[in-house]
Image (cartoon, rainbow, N blue to C red):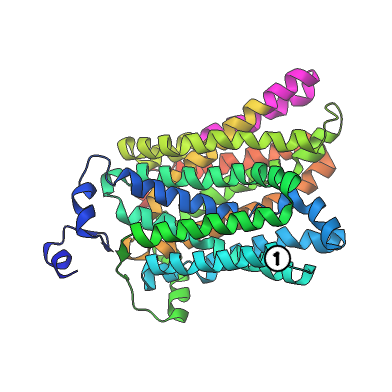
Amino acid sequence: MSNIQNTNTADLAGAAIPPQLQAAAGAVSGLPASLVLLLASATGFAVAALYYSQPMLGILGADIGASDRMIGLVPTLTQLGYALGILLLAPLGDRFDRRSIILIKSAMLVLALLLAGTAPSIGLLLLASLGIGLAATMAQDVVPAAATLAPDAHRGKVVGTVMTGLLLGILLSRVVSGFVAEHFGWRSMFIAAAVNVALIGVAVWRGLPRFRPTTDLPYAALLGSLASLWKRHRALRRATLAQALLSVGFSAFWSTLAVMLHAAPFYLGSAAAGAFGLAGAAGALAAPLAGRFADRRGPQVVTRLGAGIAAMSFAAMALLPLMPPQAALWLLVLCAVGFDLGIQASLIAHQTIVYGIDPGARSRVNAVLVVGMFIGMAIGSALGSVMQSQWGWTGVTALATITAIGALLIRMRPDHLTAS
């Protein structure tokens, strides 16, 4: 360690990198491919734990003897735990070694998944669900770790690649859990997930460098600093507000899609609505591309392009009631791919922006950004249901288009006004 401190070659914005990684850190790619793959896999397996239960609720409820109302609390508590963990635990990445935090959370996630897989009653399953949500926030420790390790010139590319792992975790988790639960039982899915996370934990223990804390603030002051960062940095406020507005439309669409497809003129079942989740692949593919483009042209340009693509995609859905069902369905698919690509590209660019604001507070600015997204998604889900019940496709489309245009207007302000 003394050699690292003396040469300073391993100090990439606060990360203490072992000597064997020093040469690779200066490579054109910025980081060894194996390390980037590890970080991407860690985010993917962590965030996937949030969604394993959703396709299994029908099987799970009948097997464990719980009412539909109680079973509905399983994904609710998982998401609640995740939101609380982002707000209350994610800022600790600036106060302590991120590697240690990731290892502790991976161990907690393994235990919570094992408890879910062996739970004899709904009470223990709900407790495990809350624990899964809290521990799955290790994904929000890995992304700032990637931003810290990456050289400035390649930060967008590295963060985009790691976010690909996160997005694929969201995309594939429901597909995998549905298949495993049907053929091997729902408990097998939780057990298999625990094994995967345990293997990731071992890989992190062996391959991830330690990180130097960037602050010595007590816990209460650390949480209080979230408000200070919000007030101090205009760029953080604008990034959070713009991404939150994009999240409103995103959540409004997905929360009402199944109802819309079930009604005229499509008359499609829940399986068709689930298949639309494959549009998330567009976001996963766009993430590294958006990151590279942000490195070359600047993240401001990417945020504008992303918000513009999302706004146009949402606006195009206003044509759906005027088209024959088959043509309308194809347009709906294209629009879903378009706005997902735009929103995910904007997210990568916004992360690149906020990670450059204060290198010593990357965990905290990430927490602010993600909490803003969650607020936007919650508002979108609530407003989307209201708009759907009152005005159908037209109402949901109008809401999503207006909020996406709002995000675009925020990002269209001159770049010099974004200075902190």
The front one of 256 and 139 is 139
The front one of 97 and 109 is 109
- Numbered label tally: 1
x, y (%) of residue 314?
A: 64, 33
Confirm whether residue 257 shows in the render.
Answer: yes
Q: Quadrant of the N terminus?
A: bottom left
Residue type pointed to by label 1? Thr
Task: Judge whether residue 310 is colored magenta.
Answer: yes
The front one of 236 and 327 is 327
Which residue is located at x 84 percent, y 35 percent?
262
Which residue is located at x 44 percent, y 71 percent?
92
In this rendering, the answer to whether 307 lies above or below 266 is: below
Confirm whether residue 49 shows in the render.
Answer: no
Q: Which residues are magenta?
A: 308-332
x, y (%) of residue 284?
A: 51, 38
Question: Looking at the image, which residue sits at the far front?
Answer: 184
> Mostly what secondary structure, the magenta segment?
helix
Left or right of residue 411: residue 415? left
Q: Which residue is mark 1?
A: 118
Task: Judge whether residue 245 is colored magenta.
Answer: no
In this rendering, the answer to whether 369 lies above or below 112 is: above
